[in-house]
Amino acid sequence: GINAEYGKQWYQRRVRVTCPKWLALSLSRQRSLSSSPSDNVRIGCFSGFWGDSCSFATQQLVNKGNIDFLVGDYLAEVTMSILAAMKKKRPELGFCPDFFEHLAPVGPKIVDKNIKVVVNAGGLNPDACAKRLGGLLQQFGLNLKVASVVGDDLINKGIELPEIEGIPYNTMNCYLGAEPIAKALDNGADIVITGRCVDSALVLGPLIHKFGWNMQEFDKLAQGSLAGHLVECGAQCTGGNFTDWHQVPDYSNVGFPIVDVQSDGVFKVTKPVKTGGLVSFGTVAEQMLYEIGDSQCYALPDVNCDFANVSIKEVGENEVEVSGAVGKPPSSTYKVSATYIDGYKATSMAPMIGPKAAQKGHLNAMSTIKRCEKVFSKMGIGSFEEVNVECLGSGSNYGKSIESSDAKEVVVWTSVRHKNKTALELWAKEIAGASTGMAPGFTTMVGGRPKPTPILRYKPFFYPKELVDISVDDTEFKNSNTEFSPTQPQSPPEATHAVANEGEFSYRLEELAFLRSGDKGNSANLGIICRNKSLYNALDARLTSAAVKEYLSYLGEDLVVTKYNLPGTGAFNFILDNALGGGGVAS
């Protein structure tokens, strides 16, 4: 009984609530030619993780970046577990909802400029994410094709690993490559939504599509992968986390990265004009070493990359040219990231003030632990499986003795682990007792009483590519590359050097080199780049695996340090295995 005009007005008002405004605004807009006039391809990355800035990055890149492709990375290791919990409660979810919010301010211009979008926001449910967006677009008559890439989720494959047999997995996803993304773009997709893939594939896929690279042009694939690797963490290559942070202008308007790629794979890293941040040799070189392992065999699904002789040159203001990556055939397996629940953990943070704050904080924390374990014994539920107490502000993160600190204010960070959730709930109730019944200076508990959460263990392994079923927009997809490395190549063993006599001057390493670290599971990497390549031989001789292990010995007896050299950039990459107490999802 509602007339048509009234119904139309009601629906438009409803639209403002249930979908991004740009969908309605774009109704009558027509797609135009690509915004990039040259034969190069310009790709901007607006997101380095789920939770990255959503207020201005897409607008900056679309309005000022002159880009052909807009890409966004959403998926860290822990993200998949968060999405799994979301999907368990509501099966139609399991993707990153921020994706729509990121696109909303720039929708009309994406349509006008024919900018393609590639994201891994699909998480554990790329089909649902793509269908929801596609349905909204169709309702408004927009002729934009949304494609999904699925097949990475192996949770229903029945895979059992001997070391954790019988324990149910929380997530299990293989890292797909770039070719399915390229196929979706070849098929006319305007927006491509994937689940788990290697982060660099978000950039390499568009390059394969645009330049027509075949999957045996390994040097080009290596260069394209390096381009993706450099921008995949957003502003982390334009001044974020930079050693010389004090030289980076205007973090409030930091420029997000753009790669301007030639058909031969050589590319420049830059950022939109009139933005903050910094693109320099240091910012780019630091990001190249972020979270890589063997620099001569950075293993990806499409190519094994050799970055040992990469050249990074400043060629203009906030413009750096990158060349020299070499590619080799990939392995016949995908890397798989699996997580499983292994008990519970709880964490508290409590400021402690006054003289000898660290000593008082440590005493209170351990006294609470001892009190609880007496109760556990009577309950028959066993002791804590792990206890970690650090007094932040006392130097504890640098392995220094707590007793040596004279800090008058610290934050007592306590983390405990137990198989029994009830044990942790009891501990959480006992913490507050320190405020009146233990050493003085206890102020409050940050965030209130801690709550137990499941421990999510990270388990990587390799799985044959031939057993993974990939589909692009509900159509079966097969990788075209059949050339594989029989084994994973290994870099040569660390060279030995005769160390010259010590001079009369001493320097902090930071004065001689840029540094960047990253983490993968229970491992971290430490990248060190000479500020001047003339320092390379001297630092190479002094920065040995043994020296680094000794310096970081407080990380534990199980620490294993491996060194890889990158002479082309004047850099070294150290892999620190067993360094993180189980990694981000477990520590």
Image (cartoon, rainbow, N blue to C red):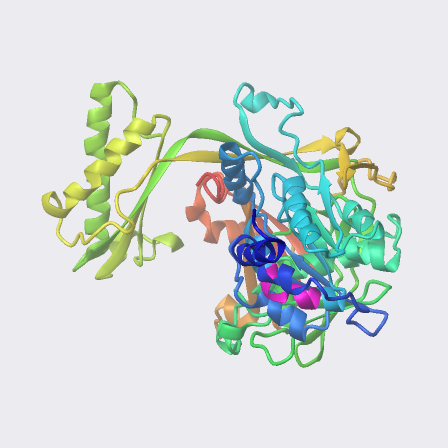
In front of the other: 299 or 532: 299
In front of the other: 95 or 251: 95
In the rendered image, the residue lying farthest to the left is: 436
* Highlighted range, magenta: 103-110
Residue 534 in the magenta stretch? The answer is no
**For the point 45% across and 47% down, which residue is it?**
553
In front of the other: 50 or 573: 50
Give how far across and how far down residue 476 sits, in percent.
81, 35
Q: Main secondary structure of the magenta part?
A: helix
Question: Relative to 303, is 374 on the left or the right?
Answer: left
Q: Quadrant of residue 38?
A: bottom right
Give how far across and how far down residue 396 sits, in percent.
34, 53
**For the point 54% across and 66% down, which residue is it?**
240
Question: Relative to 401, is 529 on the left or the right?
Answer: right
Q: How many marks?
A: 0
Against 215, is 247 above or below? below
Give how far across and how far down residue 294 sits, in percent.
68, 49
Against 566, is 66 above or below? below
Give how far across and how far down residue 325 sits, in percent.
78, 59
In front of the other: 333 or 452: 452
**For the point 79% across and 68% down, which residue is it?**
32
Q: Quadrant of the C terminus?
A: top left
Q: Can residue 106 be seen in this snapshot?
A: yes
Residue 107 in the magenta stretch? The answer is yes
